[in-house]
Image (cartoon, helix red, strand yellow):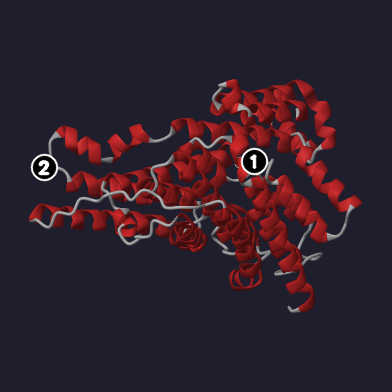
Amino acid sequence: MIIIFVLGYVVIALEHPLKINKSATALLLGVLIWVIYMFGGESILSFTDNKENFSLFLNSNPTAHFYDFISHNQLLEHLGEISEILFFLLGAMTIVELVDKHEGFRIITDKITTTNKRKLLWIIAFITFFLSAVLDNLTTSIVMIALLRKLIVNKEDRWFFGGMVILAANSGGAWSPIGDITTIMLWIGGQITSINIILKIFIPSLISMIVPLAFISLSMKGEIPKIEKEINNDRLEKKLQTQRNFMFFMGIGALLFVSIFKTLTHLPPYLGMLFGLSILWITTELLHKNKSIKNRNFYSVSGVLQKIDTPSILFFLGILIAVAGLQSAGHLRMLSVYLDQNIGNFYIVNLIIGTLSAIVDNVPLVAGAMGMYDLAIYPVDHAFWEFLAYCAGTGGSMLIIGSAAGVAVMGMEKIDFIWYLKKISLWALLGYLSGALAFYLLNEYLY
């Protein structure tokens, strides 16, 4: 399973030279991982935590077999968790695309007047950093890429900005209890409290963004071509401007409401995202009801859904299914136990977990750490949980497929894996280690 997983990642990384779409490889990888797990038989259970679950499954289903346990228990459980991410992503992408169709982002792009590449890079990075703490790193990345398309024409320049968006979104999400899926897990699990995680992680997260930002900005020279905007002061233009502003605030409001929805109802975030999408859908239907069928479809969710990057969603599906297979087979659990028994120092353990999150999804890694250490060992707001939130949140930036934000940007901008590895990964590593050092010094000598 590990060999297939590594080979799959290599093929994904070499997508452009091999001319094989990464989504096709990811789907094949995900299916093959589970096929191998299936043929591994019951012997695999002795290495996992599922042995007891399998016994309970057989007691309630006497005629069942091992493949029934995998198909109707493990696979469906993982598929439920994966579906939450996919529907969240689908809803967020649709809302952002809908706002973009109505040119709602002009309310921001019209305010950004600088054409200096370095200055613009810093502006975009800080907007992303703080916005991801309020929305989340995945949604923020989608929003910022939509903005960049309105500001930058050159693909190579936009790739650099996109890489910085990934770094800033992951760093910004790490210090907020609702900014990243792993911090949400730790917050809901009771390992961290909201005020404490903000106070303890903000400075390390900021450093993890500023260090790569400083180095990347050195390579950004010159001006970006100014995109001319039509200026029309007639009544129609004022009406369109009102409509643009209305859709922008509706869209951002729907995205912001997701965390409020979760707090009020305790239901998964994807339901809040779908709720916001449904409100926007109804709104646009009413807003354009008197237009021709062609124009109505152009501005409605029905038309927008045809523009959604479906291959990126399928790429997510394949990668997450593959990682879920490794988790079910016990590989990630064995890795966590190995780190605990052979290293011990929680600073080093978390640094390794953060590094691994650039390759393997950080959710099962954090879930494994939460399962290994209870609150009796590391109480609420212990430095272990805080550093885990930082490392798991920012470590994925080292590879473009190491985080949900990275995968989303990669899909939307078609950024090459090897290009990111050459141009961004080293600076992401320096930022990650710099922020980690800052956390260590602050925790040991100040807090």
Residue 290 tag number:
2
Give the residue drawn at x 47%, y 45%: 157
Q: Amino acid at mark 2?
A: Asn
Left or right of 379 on screen, residue 91: left
Q: Looking at the image, which residue sits at the far left? A: 235
Left or right of 305 on screen, residue 312: right
Give the residue drawn at x 12%, y 35%: 292
Q: Is residue 403 above or below residue 130?
A: above
Front in this rendered view, residue 112 or 317: 112
Q: Amino acid at mark 1?
A: Lys
Give the residue drawn at x 35%, y 59%: 253
Left or right of 259 on screen, residue 113: left
Q: CA distance from mark 2 to mark 1?
A: 52 Å
Secondary element at image label 2: loop
Q: Looking at the image, which residue sits at the far right? A: 342
Provide residue 335's location: percent of width, then percent of height.
Answer: 81, 43
Front in this rendered view, residue 205 or 117: 117
Q: Is residue 138 above or below residue 297?
A: below
Q: Which residue is mark 1?
A: 422
Provide residue 90's location: percent of width, then percent of height.
Answer: 43, 41
Q: Nearer the viewer, mark 2 or mark 1?
A: 1
Placement of the N terminus among the 4 image quadrants: top right
Query: Which comes sooner in the sequence, label 2 or label 1?
Result: 2
Secondary element at image label 1: helix
Is residue 368 visible in this depiction of the protein?
Answer: no
Front in this rendered view, residue 398 or 55: 398
Left or right of 54 on screen, residue 264: left
Placement of the C terminus among the 4 image quadrants: bottom right
Q: Identify the image quadrant of residue 170.
A: bottom right
Is residue 151 visible in this depiction of the protein?
Answer: yes
Give the residue drawn at x 31%, y 49%: 227
